[in-house]
Image (spheres, helix red, strand yellow):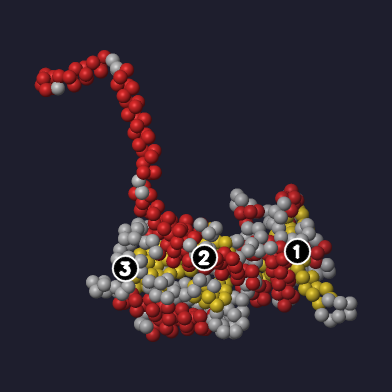
Amino acid sequence: MMKSQRLYPEFHGHCLSSQRRVSTRSVAGLAVGLLLLAWHFSILPRCLPEAHVLSRKSRFQKCSIENYLATNLTFLQTAERPPLEEYILRRDNLAKALVADSVDAFVVEPGYTFSYYANITQPEWEVWEPEERPFLMIIRPNETPDDPGSDSISITANTTFLVPHFEEERARLLDMPFPEDIFTITYEDHWDPYITLWESPIWGDTLSPLLMIDEEMRDFISRGLASRGFSTIGLRDEVEAVRQIKTAREIDILRAVNTGTVEAIRAMRKCLYPGVTENEVASVLDNTMRAAGLDPFFDIVEFGRQAALPHGGHNGTAELREGDFVLIDVGAHLYGYSSDVSRTFFPPFFPEPPLEQFNVSQQLHVWKAVLDAQTAAVQAMVPNNTAADVDLAARHIIETAGYGEQFTHRLGHSLGIKAHESPYLNQGNVWTRLRPGMVFTAEPGVYVTNEFGVRHEDVLVVREDGEAENISGGFAVSAWEP
């Protein structure tokens, strides 16, 4: 202490005095200093270039969204929210299918199929959880002659709702797409709802109506109907085909959401940089799609050897390096319809052609073989071919290339309001024949353990003449042009 007094007598004296009192001058000086510091940091973002203020991930996201918006989002022009007329058409198509299948009625509870015919999902009816009180939609065919004395008839849908009495008004307030007020059959909590439905006058003289039960129906409801005078069968035949064959409006929405998803991948790819993580890519890609009003619901982003697992499973912290393939499989919603597309590519900082120190000949060979397999599948995707025919066409190409054992999953699936719908394109599905208006993914893949994976996935609609039409923004061109 004495030494510091000799070396810094003025400083030491100030410290001693500060123990006894805090000078007015010190407090004022401190306040002025803090104000200047605050002012300095408040103007810093305006003084420095934006690139120095934004984090690297923020710049990545800004770049991706700007690229996306530069497309003018023209893909959205094909889509509109389904109007009342669309739902009437769907229910009338169902009524015709019921007649073709000789079934008295189709029964469904809130879920995907309910939303297809009446635009109400399960959470919109029961936000808490699916409950034990049945709320059922019953659709029956109504057959009327086109003209008096005419042999031709018109078939339209007649729809009834079984609903708890105390919930009847809430059901009406759902504003489901019907031209008139809905017709209800109500029951009290102490009644048997299935007997109530069986005793209703809608069945006329039919003693044991034949009901086709939707595949999403809970088992206790199916058993309740079957034990109270109804005959029941599962979803099949023409009734199942109603959702499988998309209407023109459905195809327009699917075209918009799938093209928009592919365009988001292309926009984001241009902004990739070394060291970015899989999780960061997923986050930026999601926000890019949101810029167009799409609602992303899943991402699989895999770099290099991580992509040898078709559906991922790693923690997303892998960093992108030169020579890595990027495999992305992603989906989003628009007006309740799903996208599901995949791309495999090199990042923009990896040169084309590759430098000599990077041996990527195997990756490029597999990339081309998988694209050729997809091309073969598209050519086989024609009316009256089976689902198995399409899968086998792609599988043959990959087997010929020497990677048959590394093609570990089916070729594809249908999609619509669900990302995965029937029919499914696998080599065992020899019963399903393709029809015009069916929509499928074609997603062949090869996965080389601990090295890399490649998958190309596009969405196609089966047409009356010629091969299927791509409705996901066009096929990949090269590993640098996905």
Residue 403 visible to the viewer: yes
Left or right position of 411 against 241: left
Q: Which residue is mark 1?
A: 159
Look at label 2 and name its amino acid.
Gly
Q: Earlier in the sequence, mark 2 or mark 3?
A: 2
Q: Quadrant of residue 27?
A: top left
Q: Secondary structure at mark 1?
A: strand
Look at label 1 and name its amino acid.
Thr
Left or right position of 251 against 311: right
- From the top left corner, tell me how far across and down residue 415 is, in percent: 56, 69
Q: Secondary structure at mark 3?
A: loop
Left or right position of 165 against 241: right
Query: Mark 2: few, some, or many residues within 10 Å (few <14, many ≥20)?
Result: many
Q: Which residue is mark 2?
A: 260
Q: Earlier in the sequence, mark 1 or mark 3?
A: 1
Point out the residue furthest to the right here: 148
Q: Which residue is mark 3?
A: 350
Query: Mark 1: few, some, or many residues within 10 Å (few <14, many ≥20)?
Result: some
